[in-house]
Image (cartoon, rainbow, N blue to C red):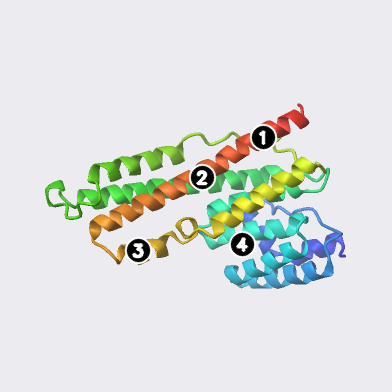
Amino acid sequence: MTTRAGIRRLFGLALLAAACLAGCGKPYLPPADPALPAEAVALMRAGDALARQGQWQPALAQYDQAHKAAPRSHLPLYGLATALDRQGGRDLAAIAYYRAYLVALPLGQSEEIGLVLGRIDELDKRAADRVAEMAERGRRMADEIPPDIWQDASVNRDQVLRSLTDAAAKARANAPPRDTHRDRRGQPSAMATLEMVSWIAAAELMRSNPSLTNVGTELKTTAARGGPENTIRIVCVLAQAQADALAALRDSERQWQAKWDVVCTP
């Protein structure tokens, strides 16, 4: 176990990261977890030390172990969210971990969650922007190859271009509104536990999918196997995967908000 002050000293930069990126004037400090076991405290300290050096991947490994040691604690979830957030290119998994963190907050400790929700908004927009950029990149690449000399007959140029447009539109549409009532958390119930587990599962699934976490590497590796038309097809596939995953996160938010509205009436 550890004290509230000890927990706050424990995190330092790692807990400051998301708040600074959100542009707020003061750092967001999650509430302490006095019940955090000693093993998890040691792992969090190790992760925080690595985070201060900008070593986000090793820090992430420490936060993963801390989460295994304390699966019900909100603090490792916040560490995972901020590490993925700072790594870059992991926005979707970061959103899911931030969501899990909000659900795992102790009863009555939902103050200032607007700062976390604001960061979720920023990551949502950044993910949508990434899809739009990929779609534009694919369109420009296609335009550089005149239709009459398109070499790869296995790739349908018009279908690819439509798919890129659809992916960009899907990523731009239907972002759920943020509502602090709907995001009221800290409810010690079976439903809260189920939601937390659901968000953690979504985050882990996204972390394991190279189409969602290693887009640049995936594009270079796959594109090297074929000509320019194949590269355009891969850009299309990656853009669609990003757009679909973002849409799935938004749908999950809406579903859980609707369930919580039944429990937490205004």
Residue indicated by mark 4: 83
Of marks 2 and 1, which one's residue comes earlier in the chain?
Answer: 2
Residue at the (66%, 46%) spot, across then down: 115
Which residue is nearer to you in this view: 6 or 131? 131
Going by the image, does 105 lie left or right of 224?
right
Residue 84 position within the rendered picture, expressed as x and y whole percent measured from the top left: 58, 60
Quarter of the image for residue 32 reads: bottom right
> Which residue in the protein does label 2 denote?
246
Q: Which mark is residue 257?
A: 1
Q: Amino acid at mark 1?
A: Gln
Camera sees residue 178: no
Q: Mark 3 or 4 closer to N-term? A: 4
**Mark 2 is on which residue type?**
Leu
Q: What is the CA distance from the residue labelled 1 to the residue labelled 4?
A: 26 Å
Q: Amino acid at mark 3?
A: Thr
Number of marks drawn: 4
Q: Earlier in the sequence, mark 1 or mark 4?
A: 4
What residue occupies the far front of the structure in this picture?
A: 154
Residue on which the image places disc 3: 222
Mark toward the viewer: 1 or 3: 3
